[in-house]
Image (tube, rainbow, N blue to C red):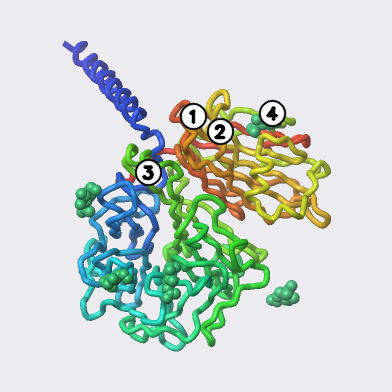
Amino acid sequence: MALPSTKMPVVFYSMVLLIINNCIEAVSVRGDYHRTGFHFQPLKNWMNDPNGPMYYNGVYHLFYQYNPNGTVWGNIVWAHSVSKDLINWNGIEHAIYPSKPFDKFGCWSGSATIIPGKGPVILYTGVIDENNTQVQCYAEPEDPNDPLLRRWVKPDKLNPAVVDKDVNHTEFRDPTTAWWGKDGHWRMLVGSVRKRRGIAYLYRSKDFKTWVRAKHPIHSKGGTGMWECPDFYPVSVIGNVVGNPVKHVLKNSLDDTKFDYYTVGTYLEDKDRYVPDNTSVDGWGGLRYDYGNFYASKSFFDPSKNRRILWGWANECDKPIDNFRKGWAGIQAIPRTVWLDFTGRQLVQWPVEELNSLRGKEVNIDNQRLEKGDYSEVKGITAAQADVEVTFSFSSLDKAEAYDPKWVKAQDLCAQKGSKLQGGVGPFGLLTLASQNLEEFTPVFFRVFKSPNKHIVLLCSDARSSSLKSDLYKPQFAGFVDVDLAADKKISLRSLIDHSVVESFGAGGKTNILSRVYPELAVMNQAHLFVFNNGTEPIVVQNLKAWSMISADIK
Ligand SMILES: *[C@@H]1O[C@H](CO)[C@@H](O)[C@H](O)[C@H]1NC(C)=O
Ligand SMILES: *[C@@H]1O[C@H](CO)[C@@H](O)[C@H](O)[C@H]1NC(C)=O
Ligand SMILES: *[C@@H]1O[C@H](CO)[C@@H](O)[C@H](O)[C@H]1NC(C)=O
Ligand SMILES: *[C@@H]1O[C@H](CO)[C@@H](O)[C@H](O)[C@H]1NC(C)=O
Ligand SMILES: *[C@@H]1O[C@H](CO)[C@@H](O)[C@H](O)[C@H]1NC(C)=O
């Protein structure tokens, strides 16, 4: 009698496997092989901006703009997820949804502020009519002792919190987290535009109830168009720690071009004005958090680990019909720790350390030499769901191609040179989400150029060969990397590969690019990862570590 009972589970097990395989098949037919394994996304439907991220009483909160009823933008509510570690998430009931005259036509983006002695409150944009008239609204937890802050209320006597007749009422949104000034008044910013001038209006309040606009915006810049989702915060000048002395960062999301640019500068507290440093370009040509698909970002301070964390939305690059078929649209980038680079000229970003808890099987490569045209597979990991950290080195910069001063736009230079046009020092890097015979691949790579006084380093994430499917947006994204390669002749790259996203961090997080890609062949266990060199200067993969990534528990 022992035999059948030991055999039974085997039979049962293989039946389960069969069912699982059938499911994978069925899922593949529907195209769900593009769903991410460790990037945050709701179980279904449309998501856009991250809202009100915070850490409170041991719990991380992420709210986000969500359509409960479809895979296109519409019916927007604040969906709400909670986590202990920023990686595994539980979705709970929607926190804010249209229910009052002041938000009947929309509950748009906003931020949380933790008021000492009181707890968290939220300021968000309410839309009051069919003409998109925008006001700022106030919400607070129904029960501040509920550990998950499930239910939020909008007291009538405090709403709408800000109505301003003197601003363009259809371009007036996305209040920031408030901060407390030395004069005992709260301050917060709201994004707007006048003519073509992007504006961050400043409001002050004694009690967080009545808000008065300051005479001058905290900052504005002609020609930049509407500023959405402003974010304003201090960064320490002494690296990856928090504390004095500080510089400030102002980030704005440019509605016209859909990218998040920032400047590093000085906050003149007495005048309540922000002045960008002369090392930061203030406008469309300025620094970006990410040179790829990353928008409407928002940061928060995490007191439990003394760090600032950045969330950003990565939209889809496929068609509405594809999203309808997938049943979902929109993911969040991996939350990133941000700090000021030692040069003081830019920020540095790195995936939060908690992500490492998902690292499974690891493979290593040391000192592998790549001649021009070589590419070599990194075997033994799940290449469709992986974390890769690599350092490339080379012995000389002599062969670097000459830099043409006309090449001011990184993205154009990447378009012109790509990975296929062979160079001097580079292109070298990773071929992610590659099919076995390279019918599909998304290369993430460096190219080094020589200009009269310095070397210019380009990081590209090129989606043009990412999919055999033709009716997709397949941009080549790129940014310049502010490093001095002459000193140590090496550069690092980290890529988080997750089915339909390749999120890369160049030179330790100085230049970052998130690409959304939709391979047809390089999916699931048919995806491969390679290192490659297409320049005449030999490149050494000094060290590469790659991990299969376990799926996060997101429900
Ligand atoms: C959900 O979408 C359907 C189809 O577009 C529509 O008929 C329905 O009114 C929507 N429901 C809500 C709550 O928006
Ligand atoms: C919306 O705009 C239209 C056209 O200007 C106007 O007729 C209508 O009264 C406006 N609605 C509201 C609620 O202001
Ligand atoms: C407000 O902004 C909208 C959209 O940019 C623009 O069409 C309109 O002219 C602006 N209104 C005023 C009064 O400037
Ligand atoms: C930039 O500002 C610094 C002081 O913050 C100053 O020393 C320097 O001369 C300025 N550079 C330019 C080009 O204006
Ligand atoms: C390397 O260059 C060759 C020759 O131009 C090209 O055929 C090949 O596709 C390139 N490799 C990559 C990964 O782009």
The amino acid type, in three-letter code, at marker 3 is Pro
User: What distance separates the C-alpha of mark 3 from that of mark 4?
Assistant: 38 Å
Q: Residue 432 location in percent, x, y?
A: 55, 35
The residue mark sitting in front, 2 or 3, is: 3
Query: Is residue 154 placed above or below 315 in the rendered structure?
Result: below
- Residue at image mark 1: 522
The amino acid type, in three-letter code, at marker 1 is Ala
Q: Provide the secondary structure element on which disc 2 rests.
A: loop
- Between 107 and 509, the residue placed more toward the observer is 107
Query: Is residue 194 placed above or below 415 in the rendered structure?
Result: below
- Residue at image mark 2: 441
Which numbered dot is residue 320?
Answer: 3
In screen coordinates, is 528 left or right of 343?
left
Q: Residue at x 50, y 62 (%)?
A: 254
Q: Residue at x 53, y 72 (%)?
A: 197
Crowd rating for badge 1 (residues with CA inside 10 Å; few <14, some 14–19, many 20+): many
Q: Residue at x 43, y 66 (%)?
A: 303
Of the residues under marks 4 and 1, which one precedes in the sequence?
Answer: 4
In screen coordinates, is 312 left or right of 487?
left
- Residue at image mark 4: 374
Query: Is residue 483 placed above or below 167 in the rendered structure?
Result: above
When asked about the image quadrant of residue 525, the answer is top left
Of the residues under marks 2 and 3, which one precedes in the sequence?
Answer: 3
Of the residues under marks 2 and 4, which one precedes in the sequence?
Answer: 4
Q: Taking the image as four quarters, which one is ligand 3 found in?
A: bottom left
- Does mark 2 have its CB less than 8 Å from ligand 5? yes
The amino acid type, in three-letter code, at marker 2 is Phe
The residue mark sitting in front, 2 or 4, is: 2
User: What distance separates the C-alpha of mark 3 from that of mark 1?
Assistant: 22 Å
